[in-house]
């Protein structure tokens, strides 16, 4: 009660909402710039079980924005180091490590284990895979994307608009070579925090979510817009 007191005193959450968080399971796909703040805030909020899914290792260029890591962890597995850091924050949280990442071969098995899926990846292939699997399993997922100074967030529910409605040119996008672009460090923190907030609202059942909408943020010009999908 003391640990989550500042959260429990919110009437929208209260003791019942805190129990829902403790009973919830969330899969975070991608432990980069977006996944780091999402994992930190959901662990801090008291989500009972969190899946950490990423096959990448930590590089020195990650440290400008990926806040779970440090210089001494360069070259180590992101799932391993993220789990170690998060357990320091909450020893009672159950963490599942999926070190092979999300693939065509394991997506259904992994996603079926969780109540809510959060996309913190950086490629269309994985997002289409998340969408197809979530549609099949009737799961809700939260989308986040960043680049340069701009970011987007949306929540896709089984009965609502799909990611493929937002990006219908699937074959073209899947065959476009991946490119590395710039990103200002605080941007994934902003977008990831909104994704975590969406997750808490969905789990506890309060407030207005981004289901059927997309939030577009431009930090360079400090502009925020919400569009209907």
Image (cartoon, grey):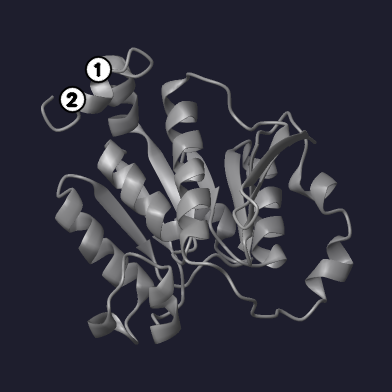
Above or below 8: residue 25: below
Q: Which mark is residue 101?
A: none
- Dividing the picture into quadrants, the one containing residue 214 is top right
Q: Position of residue 25 (x, y in %)?
A: 39, 40
Label 2 neighbourhood size at 10 Å, few (<14), some (14-19), many (20+)? few
Residue 19 placement, left or right of 215: left
- Dividing the picture into quadrants, the one containing residue 77 is bottom left
Question: Residue at 47% of width from left, 64% of height from top?
Answer: 33
Name the residue carrying label 1: 9
Secondary structure, mark 2, is helix
Q: Position of residue 19 (x, y in %)?
A: 28, 24
Question: Are the residues at dot 1 and dot 2 in contact (C-beta closer than 8 Å)?
Answer: yes
Above or below 123: residue 7: above
Name the residue carrying label 2: 5
Secondary structure, mark 1, is loop
Residue furthest left as drawn:
2
Above or below 99: residue 155: above
Residue furthest front as drawn:
221
- Which residue occupies the foreground of this view, 85 or 113? 85
Label 1 neighbourhood size at 10 Å, few (<14), some (14-19), many (20+)? few
Spatial CA span between label 1 and label 2: 6 Å
Q: Position of residue 58 (x, y in %)?
A: 38, 80
- Which residue occupies the foreground of this view, 49 or 188? 188
Above or below 134: residue 200: above
Question: Residue at 79% of width from left, 70% of height from top?
Answer: 174
Question: Residue at 49% of width from left, 63% of height from top?
Answer: 30
- Which residue occupies the foreground of this view, 132 or 199? 199
Residue 109 placement, left or right of 6: right
Q: Position of residue 148 (x, y in %)?
A: 63, 67
The quadrant of the rendering that contains the C terminus is: top right
């Amino acid at each position: 009660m003391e640990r989550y007191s500042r959260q429990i005193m919110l009437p929208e959450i209260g003791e019942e909402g805190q129990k829902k968080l403790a009973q919830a399971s969330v899969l975070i796909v991608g432990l980069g710039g977006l996944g780091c703040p999402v994992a930190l805030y959901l662990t801090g909020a008291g989500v009972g079980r969190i899946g950490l899914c990423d096959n990448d290792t930590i590089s020195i260029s990650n440290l400008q924005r990926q806040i779970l890591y440090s210089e001494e962890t360069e070259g180590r597995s992101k799932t391993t180091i993220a789990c170690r850091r998060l357990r320091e924050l909450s020893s009672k949280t159950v963490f599942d490590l999926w070190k092979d990442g999300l693939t065509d071969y394991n997506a259904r098995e992994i996603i079926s284990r969780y109540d809510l899926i959060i996309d913190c990846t950086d490629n269309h292939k994985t997002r289409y895979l998340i969408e197809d699997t979530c549609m099949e399993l009737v799961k809700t997922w939260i989308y986040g994307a960043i680049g340069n100074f701009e970011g987007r967030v949306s929540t896709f529910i089984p009965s609502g608009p799909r990611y493929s409605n937002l990006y219908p040119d699937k074959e073209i996008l899947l065959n476009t070579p991946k490119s590395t672009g710039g990103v200002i460090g605080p941007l994934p923190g902003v977008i990831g925090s909104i994704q975590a907030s969406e997750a808490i609202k969905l789990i506890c059942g309060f407030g207005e979510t981004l289901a059927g909408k997309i939030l577009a943020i431009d930090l360079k010009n400090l502009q925020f817009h919400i569009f209907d999908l």
